[in-house]
Amino acid sequence: MTQPITFDVCAAVSALIAHYRARSQGDDAVAAELRSVLSLLPEIVPVQTADIHGDPGHSVSRFVDDALAPKLGTVSDVSDALRPIAAILPWRFSYAPRADLPGLENRMAWAEFVGPEAPIHSDKIGIGVTLIGPHTLYPAHFHPAVESYFVLSGTALWTAAGVTRALPPGSFILHPENIVHAMETYEAPLLAAYTWTGDIVTSSAYADKH
């Protein structure tokens, strides 16, 4: 039996926190949510090593090299912190299979750094990364958590409440609780950091019948 791989996630989290602090200085809804995120972060985050058991076998890891390759627009400091560990993060996908989107579980996944069951424990906030392969639709879905996204790599179509925008790396997106939203990638994979506040226990659900 293969032994789990252990690695430190704090460098990646600390890099993200620096961006959250900078963006939180604004006066819009994104800034307000990031101020809430920062207020909920455990003090342990920037200073204590947090180990996590990795899984190098998840199929979504095949998109990691492309997502983290140095290129124009990529958020370089977070990418640099993620590059040594991204392929072996504990990627997971929790939705039930869909007949109209076969193999979606092999084309997208997320990994959590901070949260109820994450290496950096918190019952009030979740922080992680979502990776979506090229030419992939993350269908319309919703959740009671308030969610922010910070695009690290890849320009994709982001839809929320019926409005669709193409958003490049460096963009911040806010999804209020229970808003229906979706993402669709072009020829490049999408890597984005997310935060959850509020009800971070209830899982996402698809918004349409299938």
Image: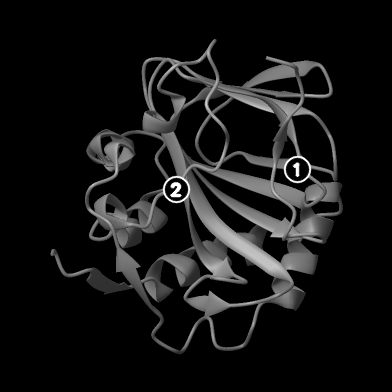
Asked if one can make out residue 199 in the rendered structure from this viewpoint, the answer is yes
Q: By what rule are the colours in the image chosen?
A: one colour
Nearer the N terminus, badge 1 or badge 2? 2
User: What percent of the width, then of the height, locates residue 60?
Assistant: 33, 37
Relative vertical location of residue 15 with respect to residue 142 in this rendering, above or below? below
Q: Position of residue 197 (x, y in %)?
A: 76, 61
As displayed, is residue 78 above or below residue 68? below
- The reply to whether callout 1 and callout 2 are in contact (CB within 8 Å) is no
**Is 146 placed above or below 42 here?**
above
Element type where label 2 sits in the image: loop
Quadrant in which the C terminus appears = top right
Q: Residue at x 23, y 39 (%)?
A: 65
121 left or right of 62 in image:
right
Describe residue 201's horizontal placement relative to residue 42 as left or right: right
- Give the residue number, with chain letter if any, for mark 1: 174
Which residue is tagged 2?
Answer: 92
Q: Nearer the viewer, residue 70 or 91?
A: 91
Q: Residue at x 37, y 23 (%)?
A: 188
Pair 1/2: label in front: 2
Characterize the local packing of mark 1: few (<14), some (14-19) or many (20 or more) Cα atoms within 10 angstroms: some
The amino acid marked with disc number 2 is Arg
The x and y percentages for residue 111 are 46, 54
Q: Is residue 206 left or right of residue 88?
A: right
| Residue type at numbered disc 1 | Leu
The residue located at (43%, 32%) in the rendering is 105
